[in-house]
Amino acid sequence: MPAEDGLRINIRFATAADGPRCADIFLHGRRAAFSWQPEDRFGLDDYYDCVDGEEVLVAEAGGGVVGFISVDVADRFIHNLFIAPLWRGRGIGSALLREALTLLRGSAELACASRNAAARAFYEHNGWTPVPAAESGGDADPLVVYRKSAL
């Protein structure tokens, strides 16, 4: 499948062998996305806890895994989307989102930290619509929930 810049990517279900690479992408991606949090708040093992019970799709390009998306199929919720830094801006995240929507065959939701302006712009650029906010209960890191129907 070609990405937006013509890059050839392969999207497939993750295997156990993909775990260490996905954990590394997850760790560094979270540290960058949540720059207001202390770096030591995040660890490599967080990946395994965060995707437990979810379907994980990986994107391969340039000979290796360059990103992943995790989906809670029962809740129709996209939980994580992370791309390795050197591969961002090449359509890989958009391709993973499209594949996740195909997997879900209907509408889906995802959430993103309200402070993460880059992620919010990315989701809105990809046609995701913010859901009217519910009471946040004073959450220090409020989330914005997005919704989109399958293609």
Image (tube, rainbow, N blue to C red):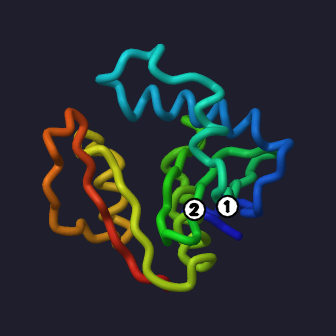
For label 1, the crowd category at 10 Å Cα-Cα, with few meaning under 14, some 14 to 19 and many 20 or more, is some
Q: Residue at x 30, y 53 (%)?
A: 120
C-alpha gap between disc 1 and disc 2: 5 Å
**Residues marked 1 and 2 touching at CB (< 8 Å):** yes
Q: Is residue 101 above or below residue 86?
A: below
Q: Is residue 8 left or right of residue 91?
A: right
Q: Residue at x 56, y 71 (%)?
A: 74
* Image spot of residue 89 (x, y percent): 49, 49
- Residue 148: image tag: none
* Image spot of residue 130 (x, y percent): 24, 66
Q: Is residue 66 left or right of residue 31?
A: right
| Number of numbered tags placed on the structure image | 2
Q: Is residue 5 above or below residue 136?
A: below
Q: Is residue 8 above or below residue 148?
A: above
Indicate the secondary structure of the residue bearing disc 2: strand
Q: Earlier in the sequence, mark 1 or mark 2?
A: 1
Q: Residue at x 51, y 63 (%)?
A: 94
Residue at label 2? Answer: 71
In which quadrant is the N terminus drawn? bottom right
Q: Is residue 112 left or right of residue 71?
A: left
Residue at label 1? Answer: 55
Q: Quadrant of residue 115?
A: top left
Q: Residue at x 44, y 73 (%)?
A: 108
Residue kind at label 2, given as amino acid type:
Val
Q: Quadrant of residue 26?
A: top right
* Image spot of residue 68 (x, y percent): 63, 51
Residue situated in front as seen by the camera: 71 or 25? 71
Residue kind at label 1, given as amino acid type:
Glu
Instruction: Report the residue that reaches farthest toward the front.
Output: 137
* Image spot of residue 77 (x, y percent): 47, 65
For label 2, the crowd category at 10 Å Cα-Cα, with few meaning under 14, some 14 to 19 and many 20 or more, is many
